[in-house]
Image (cartoon, rainbow, N blue to C red):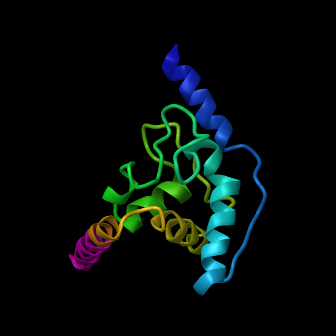
Amino acid sequence: MASSVIAAALTACGGALPTVTADADGPAALQGGEELYVATCQRCHGDETGAGGVPGAPPHHDEGHTWHHPDAQLIDWILNGKPFTAMPAFGDRLNEADANRILTYIKTWWTDEQRAEQADASERYQEALDAQNESP
């Protein structure tokens, strides 16, 4: 019963959302990332303190675990949903640049050490993907 309530709440998070677009670089991208996060993610995952989220949706701040995942994986989940969870796909409303803006914004909530570790994990993950794609 509790899992169906959580699933229903998370599915509701994927409801009709406004379309927000931002510039690709600099402060405008950060502001655009904040606008996209508020419009698309915050109702489920909460704000920078985790407040306002729904049970079952992990917070993205420094006490959460989002920073343990590489960028490519996070972008995939944003655009295509996260398998075996109630995380919906947003690829019909967001593109890869939008997903990157959201990540740029939530990374401001992490410590310097978390950002460095996540950047290293992202680089290693991308190298592995590239190597896999080069294999015959």
Q: Residue at x 41, y 62 (%)?
A: 110
Q: Answer with left or right where residue 118 lies relative to residue 32.
A: left
Q: Position of residue 39 (x, y in %)?
A: 70, 55
Q: Is residue 15 visible?
A: yes
How many discs appear? 0
Q: Does the magenta stretch include residue 135?
A: yes
Q: Answer with left or right where residue 59 lies relative to residue 31.
A: left
Q: Residue at x 66, y 73 (%)?
A: 31
- Give the prevailing secondary structure in the magenta stretch: helix
Q: Does the magenta stretch include residue 95?
A: no
Looking at the image, is 46 positioned above or below residue 124? above
The residue furthest top is 1
Looking at the image, is 54 positioned above or below residue 109? above
Tell me where residue 105 sits by quadrant. bottom right
The residue furthest bottom is 25
Q: Where is residue 77 in the image (x, y as percent from the top left)?
A: 47, 55
Tell me where residue 52 sits by quadrant. top right
Q: Give the range drawn in magenta.
A: 119-136
Q: Where is residue 126 in the image (x, y as percent from the top left)?
A: 30, 74
Looking at the image, is 44 positioned above or below residue 3? below
Looking at the image, is 109 positioned above or below residue 16? below
Q: Residue at x 46, y 43 (%)?
A: 58
In the foreground, 24 or 113: 113
Q: Answer with left or right where residue 57 lies relative to residue 131.
A: right
In the foreground, 113 or 74: 113
Q: Can residue 24 be seen in this view?
A: no
Q: Position of residue 125 (x, y in %)?
A: 27, 69
Q: Which residue is drawn at 54% across and 54% down?
A: 48
